[in-house]
């Protein structure tokens, strides 16, 4: 793809179909801080492959 990329190397990912709810495909990701669960993010899009402009709903875990 055209753009300011390439010198960093490549990341190869395997395709896995996302579940579809209504008219949107959804991907749930999580992150850790100091080996502890810190939050999740839900990314959804009408396209099968999410992108940088997909809807994103962050959730933070607070004790």
Image (spheres, grey):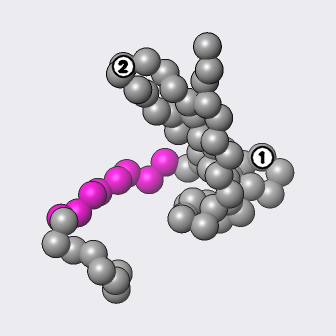
Provide the major secondary structure of the magenta segment.
loop
Query: Mark 1 sits on what residue?
Result: 21
User: Residue 9: x and y, percent?
Assistant: 18, 64
- Asked where in the image residue 49 lies, by quadrant, the reply is bottom right
Number of other residues with Cα within 10 Å of mark 1, as a class: few under 14, some 14 to 19, many 20 or more: few
Tell me, yes or no, whether the highlighted magenta stretch contains residue 13: yes
Write down the region rendered in magenta: 9-16
Marks 2/1: CA–CA distance:
31 Å
User: Residue 44: x and y, percent?
Assistant: 67, 53
Location of the N terminus by quadrant is bottom left
**Residue found at the far top of this picture:** 63
Residue 37 vs 6, above or below: the answer is: above
The residue depicted at 51 percent of the width and 26 percent of the height is 38
Tell me, yes or no, whether the highlighted magenta stretch contains residue 52: no
Number of other residues with Cα within 10 Å of mark 2, as a class: few under 14, some 14 to 19, many 20 or more: few
The residue depicted at 58 percent of the width and 34 percent of the height is 40
User: Residue 54: x and y, percent?
Assistant: 63, 61
Q: Secondary structure at mark 1?
A: strand
Query: Mark 2 sits on what residue?
Result: 35
Residue 53 vs 34, above or below: the answer is: below
């Amino acid at each position: 793809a055209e753009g300011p990329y390439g010198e960093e190397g490549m990341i190869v990912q395997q395709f896995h179909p996302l579940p579809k709810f209504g008219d949107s495909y959804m991907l749930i990701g999580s992150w850790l801080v100091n080996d502890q669960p810190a939050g999740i993010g839900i990314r959804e899009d009408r396209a099968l492959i999410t992108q940088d402009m997909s809807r994103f709903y962050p959730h933070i875990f607070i004790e």
